[in-house]
Every structure is written in structure tokens, then in C-alpha cells.
Amino acid sequence: METDKILYAKVFVDNKTHTLNREHWLNMIKKCTSNMYDNEWNQYFPAVKENFNDCDAPILLYYNHSLNKAIRIIQYDPNVYDAKYRYNQYITAWTSKMSINELEIPELVICLLLTRNNNSDAERLIDNWLNNNDQLLDSKIKSIYNGQK
Amino acid sequence: MLLNRGRIQAQGKGCEQSQSWTQEIVPTKSDGRERADLLKMQLTRRELKDREYSFGKLDKFISHAPYSGYDVCTRSFTPIPPQEDVRVDVEIIKGKAFCD
């Protein structure tokens, strides 16, 4: 029996929950960058033009100008969850390059069903990424992939 | 002259194939579907099977584009539940894409 719990279950149902969910990620990033200079050039790309019920749009795009790194977070609609799988099978991550103003920026992409445990994993990934802990990041991604099996 | 640039990519588990465009005219929805079909032809049977759901989401994304097309954006479509870094990405890098 699943003991983990889905967070912000109505993220793609009502705007208020979507906003709270996005603030959750903003607060997490602020916590991970609390030891860094608060650069006014850091950008958060709010999904202003997106419909809040578009679950394919990233819930957060973040670009840290000082580090020249980006983070893109995509949440799965809780309705896609199939009980024959575990919650921890609904998280994955990778690093790649994204285009911002036609420049290629290193990015961390996290796709997840937001549950308490998946949230903790995401926080570790973000913290390792922003603090340049590449080995720890790779190790965490591998353990997430192992959890999918 | 504003150019429209973008690409559709199949990536993950060692796969890295793409179809890109750089053109003056905004690519249409039909152009987008054609690029997706060309990309599918570049994949092995296994790579295509792993991305069946993802290509379905891509098709839906293209179909739901507004009349004048999407602005610059990136979307990644993973299988559900995900399989490592397997995905189909679409990046609209400059201009617009998938107009009517």
C-alpha cells in the first residue's frame, strides 16, 4: 500500500492551487540558493501566457544568470497515475541544453508526479545542480532511474 | 528578416535524432507532423516503441497550436511512467511554429 502522498492534487484543476504549487518550487529554489548572491538577473519564467490547466507546460522555468544554469520542472497530471505502479516510478530527470535568447544554456529537467517523497528527491537534484555537485547529481539521477524498475 | 527556427528531437537511452527547421515562413501544423514522421523514420523499432506515447503527445501539441502558431517555447514529452531520460522534445527557438 502506497504510504507516500500526492501534493497539490488540483494543480491542473484550479488556478489558486497552480499558483501555490509554483510558489512551492520558487521557495525551494530560493532555499537552495540562499548561500548565493541574490542576482537581480536571475529569471523566473512564470507561465503567464500558459493556461494553468496545461499539464504539458513546465510549471517552472528558472535561469540563474551567475551560474548560467537553468531548471525546468514538469509535473505530471495526478490523473495519469496508475495504481499498478509505485509513486517513485513517476519521477525522472536529465541534464541537457536549452535555448534562451538563442544561447544554449545547461539545464536540469525534472519530470514528476509531485508527492512528498518525489518532492524530496527533486530538492536534492536542484540543490546538487545549483551547487555544482556533479557527482552527487549523477548519483541521484541514477538512483531515480533504478527506482523506476 | 525574422527567421523561424526550431527542432523536434528524440532523445534518451542513447538515442539522439532530430529534425530541425530554419525558414522565413512559419512552419504549419502539417509541416510539424511531417517533421515528426521523418523523425520517426530515423528511429529503430525499439526507440519508436519507447516513444509511442510521447509522439502522441507531440501530435496533440501540434494540433492544439493557436492559429498563428506557438511562440518560442520548449516541451518535453516523456513516456508515462517515465523511462530514464527517454523523451521527445520540441524546441521553438526563434519566431513561431505550427500555424494553421
Image (tube, coloured by chain):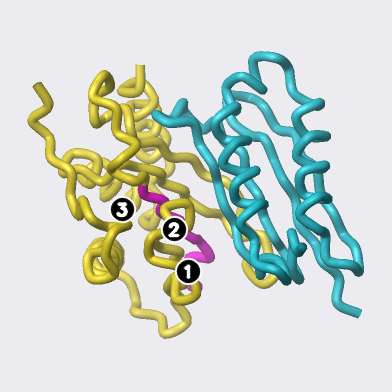
Chain colours: A yellow, B cyan
Direction from residue B91 to residue A11 in the image, left or right? left
Confirm or deny contact between disc 2 and disc 1 (CB under 8 A). Answer: yes
- Disc 2, SS: loop
Gap between marks 3 and 2, in whole Å? 27 Å
Residue labelled with disc 2: A54
Gap between marks 2 and 1, in whole Å? 7 Å
Residue labelled with disc 3: A127
The nearer-to-camera label among 1 and 3 is 1
Q: Residue furthest bottom?
A: A40
Front residue of B96 and A102:
B96
Q: Position of residue A27 (x, y in %)?
A: 23, 67
Q: Earlier in the sequence, mark 1 or mark 3?
A: 1
Q: Is residue B70 above or below residue A140?
A: below
Quadrant position of residue A84 = top left
Front residue of B97 and B88:
B97
Gap between marks 1 and 3, in whole Å? 27 Å
Residue B64 colored magenta?
Answer: no
In the rendered image, the quadrant that contains the N terminus of chain B is bottom right
